[in-house]
Amino acid sequence: MVDAKKQDPRSKFPPVEGGKSRYNLTSGKYMKIWQGPQHPGITGNMSLELTVCGDEVVDCKTHVGYLHRGFEKLMERRKYIQCFPLVCRICVPEPDFNEYLFAECVEELAGIQIPERAKWLRALTLEMARLTSFLMWIGGQAGSFGMGTIGQWTVTMRDYMLDLFEELSGGRIYHMYIIPGGVRADLPEGYEGRVESTLKQIEKVLKDVELALMHNYVFKKRAKGLGIITPDMVDEYGITGPNARGSGVKRDIRKDNPYLIYDQLDFEIVTETGSDAYARTWVRMKEMYQSIDLIRQMMKKMPKEGPFFQKLPNVLHWKVPAGQTYHKSECTRGEYGFYMVSDGTELPRRVYVRGPSYTHAVTLMERLAVNTNIADTAGLMVSLHTYPPEIER
C-alpha cells in the first residue's frame, strides 16, 4: 500500500515567502495552464487550474460554476411539485436519485405511505439509472486514456437504456417519473421482455469492454498507481461509493441502511484493494454486472399487480406540515442525500443537497493531482466520477 504522505511532492517546490502563490511562477521554472471547462477529459463543465514544472503537476485548483447552479435557492421559491423539473438537473446522467430523495423527504414530512408496487418501480428505476450512468462513465474513462472506441460502444448501449426510460416516462434524459405518492405510470405492456433484451446486449458489450480496457497493457500501465486513495483517507476526506470501495472499504448504503426493497434482494458489496484508478474502474465494471443482476431480480420478484400511486391533496395548494428530515441513497458516486425543512407553507423553507462530487472533485482532486503527469490528469479526474452541478447546487 502506498503511503499517502509520501505522495505530496511540495517539499521539492518551496513556497514563495510572503507571495500570493506558493510557487514562484515568474522564475521560469513553473507554468500555469488551464484544463477545461470545455475539454474531453473534464467531468462535465469544470476547470482545473494547474501549476506545472515541465510535464509534472505541482499544484491544482478546481473551478466550477460553468453549468447548472443555484438549485437550492430556486427550490425555496417554488411549490413542492414545481421543484421536480429542477432537481433532475442537479445530476444529468442519473436524475432519478434526485427525484427519489426529494419525493422521500416530502412524503415523510407529509406522512404519506406509498404502495408496495411503487417501491419496486422506484428501485427498478434507480438501478436502471445506475447502469446508464456507469455506461457513460466508463466510456469517458477509456476516452481519457485515448481509447475512444470503447466510448462509442458504451454510449450506444446507454442510448438503448434511454429508449427504455423514454418508453416508461416519456423522457430520455430527465424522467420526472418518481413523484410524491409513488410513480407516474405503471410498466408498459411487454416492458419486461424489452428490458431483458437490452440487458443481454449490454452484457455482451461489457465482455468486450473488459477485454479491450481492463486487460489492456497501456491502460493498466497508466491507471495502476494513479490517484492512490488509502483507506485512512476515506473518513478524513468524506469519500464514499466506488472511490471508497476501490480502497477496500466495504460501505454501501443499499446494504448498510437499506431503503425501498433492497433488503429483499441478493447481492454483496463490491470492493477492490488496489486503491488506484485501475481498482476504481474494476469496482464500477463489476457494479454494472451487479446492476444487471439486480434489475433481473426486481423483474422477477416485483408484485405483478397493485396500485403504484397514493392519492395526494391538490398539489398546487399543498401545505406540507412543518418539520425537517434527511434521506440518503447510494448513487453511482456514493452517498447522495437531501435535507429538507418545511415551515408549513406551500414552499420548502430549505432544501440542501449533499452530493459526493463536492468532496471528490474539489478537496480530493486537488490533492491527488499533485505529482501526476499532465497527460494523466484527465484520467485521474474521470476515475473519481464527479458531476459539477452537485457542487454548485
Image: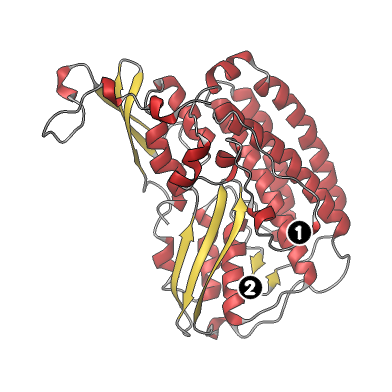
- Whole-Å distance between the Cαs marked 2 and 1? 22 Å
Mark 1 neighbour density, 10 Å: few (under 14) some (14–19) many (20 or more)? few
168 to 211, vertically: above or below: below
Q: Circle 2: is it few (<14), some (14-19), or many (20+) Cα within 10 Å? A: many
Camera sees residue 82: yes
Write the residue at 45% across / 82% down: 343
The spot of residue 112 in percent (x, y) is 66, 79
Q: Is residue 163 above or below residue 81?
A: above
Tell me if I can see residue 191 in this picture. Answer: no
Q: Earlier in the sequence, mark 2 or mark 1?
A: 2
User: Quadrant where the C terminus lies?
Assistant: bottom left
Residue at point 46%, 78% (across, down): 347
Please state if 379 lies on the left or on the right of 70 as rendered: right
Horizontally, residue 314 falls left or right of residue 46, namely right
Q: Which residue is mark 2?
A: 180
Residue at 55% across / 82% down in the picture? Answer: 316
Assign a secondary structure to mark 1: helix
Along the viewing direction, whichever of 330 and 146 lies nearer the viewer: 330
